[in-house]
């Protein structure tokens, strides 16, 4: 292992903490539809997803290269405390959106935190604007649209092919297809999201002089990042799973299969090209597309609008927290310690707030209430919400809640 100073060690531990939050924040991407349709029991689903996240972390380093040498200029003099501050911004936003049950982008939280901290410390010149546009912003807009259109077409094709088949006869096939496609999404998630933490850790090692600029992540970095995201995935982000599985549309097995297959294809293709896209946005787009693809299907646009608003807020909000943390961390050792204490205190407060209305594997498929037709709000997932109001004129009739699948033993 390369020589690691105390400050770099703090950065690496914080990066792994972010990776852990990324795991439970984004479990819904792979498993929400599988759990909501009853194709797998909740605990078994997150266990399978965790294992495949770990495997996926070893399959590629293209996205890690984008993070370590693409978004931030690694030769601009960035210091480890700046990377630490960026991670703080990403973690705080991840926890806040998890509390609200909003499937926001962990990827964009990371980018926002790093960019905000870098700008506050060094200036805009240290940010590679072209890389941000081509490898972050364009995929952020294009990927969910591509996945949504693909899921819509796949859902319509699936129903057309099986329109004369007996529903009971095809149930077993769709169940197997959902499990297989969920496994593919989990593998794809590992190839994309785990690498983002690898890239940050590699950037910290380069900033501290432990690695040469342009170096690939060492094996211990790959392994630790894979284990951290797998552990977070196994914990299960039940609040966001409830929103993705029940809050956007009423998903049936054919839709779940189509959505997951479309999302996995989009994520794997992007990982191969080195695009550090948001798996959350891709999977959310695919779920909404599957709702549009079924005749009589309903997309709950009030939930979707609030979710998209959170996507737009993620980069600037995480960037603001990262910038403030950087200004404090650069004061010296006491500044770094103060930022660490504030991060722990904020995390503890959010966790304590979440215990008031816990959501876990035993109640993840319970729908507390449907869409509120009066003000466009929803209580699906968690009553604590970020202040992201929906337009008052928008009102989408809520469909009747589907019967819950068999509960886990």
Image: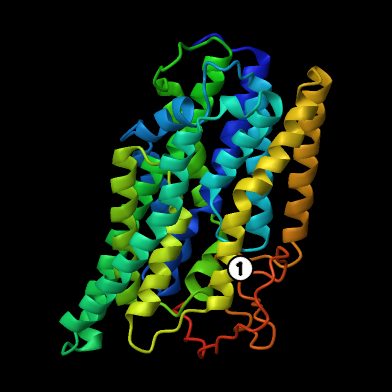
Image quadrant of residue 310?
bottom right
Q: Element under label 1?
A: helix
Give x and y (percent) for residue 172. 24, 75
Measuring 51% from the left and 91% from the top, which residue is drawn there? Answer: 400
Compared with 82, 23 (above or below) is below
Give x and y (percent) for residue 94. 62, 49
- Between 157 and 183, the residue placed more toward the observer is 157
Compared with 131, 350 (above or below) is below
Q: Is residue 372 visible to us here? A: yes
Measuring 66% from the left and 30% from the top, which residue is drawn there? Answer: 119
- Between 196 and 41, the residue placed more toward the observer is 196
Measuring 26% from the left and 72% from the top, which residue is drawn there? Answer: 153
Q: Is residue 385 left or right of residue 265?
A: right
- Count of labels shown? 1
Give x and y (percent) for residue 318. 66, 44
- Between 48 and 219, the residue placed more toward the observer is 219
Task: Say which residue label 1 marks.
Answer: 306
Measuring 52% from the left and 64% from the top, which residue is drawn there? Answer: 241
Q: Residues within 10 Å of mark 1 (few under 14, many from 20)?
A: many
Compared with 399, 69 (above or below) is above
Q: Is residue 409 visible to us here? A: no
Q: Is residue 77 left or right of residue 141?
A: right
Q: Is residue 264 left or right of residue 12?
A: left
Give x and y (percent) for residue 34. 39, 67
Image quadrant of residue 120?
top right
Q: How is the image coloured?
A: rainbow
């Amino acid at each position: 292992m390369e020589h690691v100073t105390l400050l770099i060690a703090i950065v690496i531990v914080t990066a792994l903490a972010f990776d852990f939050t990324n795991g439970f924040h984004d479990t819904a991407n792979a498993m929400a539809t599988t759990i909501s349709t009853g194709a797998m029991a909740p605990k078994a689903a997150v266990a399978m997803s965790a294992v495949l996240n770990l495997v996926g972390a070893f399959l590629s380093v293209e996205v890690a290269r984008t993070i370590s040498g693409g978004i931030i200029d690694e030769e601009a003099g960035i210091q480890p405390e700046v990377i630490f501050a960026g991670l703080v911004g990403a973690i705080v936003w991840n926890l806040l959106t998890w509390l609200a049950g909003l499937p926001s982008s962990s990827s964009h939280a990371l980018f926002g935190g790093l960019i905000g901290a870098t700008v506050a410390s060094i200036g805009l010149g240290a940010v590679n604007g072209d890389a941000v546009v081509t490898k972050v912003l364009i995929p952020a807009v294009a990927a969910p649209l591509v996945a949504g259109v693909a899921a819509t077409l796949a859902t319509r094709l699936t129903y057309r092919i099986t329109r004369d088949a007996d529903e009971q006869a095809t149930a077993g096939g769709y169940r197997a297809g959902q499990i297989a496609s969920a496994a593919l999404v989990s593998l794809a998630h590992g190839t994309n999201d785990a690498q983002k933490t690898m890239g940050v850790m590699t950037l910290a090692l380069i900033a501290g002089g432990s690695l040469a600029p342009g170096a690939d992540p060492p094996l211990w970095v790959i392994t630790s990042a894979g284990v951290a995201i797998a552990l977070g995935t196994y914990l299960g982000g039940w609040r966001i799973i409830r929103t993705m599985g029940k809050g956007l549309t009423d998903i049936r097995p054919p839709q779940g299969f189509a959505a997951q297959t479309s999302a996995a294809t989009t994520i794997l293709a992007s990982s191969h090209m080195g695009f550090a896209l948001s798996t959350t946005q891709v999977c959310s787009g695919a779920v909404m597309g599957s709702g549009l693809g079924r005749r009589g299907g309903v997309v709950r646009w009030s939930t979707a609008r609030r979710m998209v608003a959170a996507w737009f807020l993620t980069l600037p909000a995480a960037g603001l927290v990262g910038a403030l943390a950087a200004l404090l961390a650069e004061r010296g050792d006491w500044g770094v310690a103060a930022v660490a204490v504030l991060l722990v205190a904020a995390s503890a407060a959010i966790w304590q707030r979440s215990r008031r209305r816990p959501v876990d594997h035993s109640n993840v498929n319970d729908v507390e209430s449907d869409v509120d037709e009066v003000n466009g709000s929803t209580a699906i997932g968690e009553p604590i919400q970020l202040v992201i109001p929906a337009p008052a004129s928008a009102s989408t009739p809520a469909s009747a809640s589907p019967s819950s699948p068999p509960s886990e033993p």
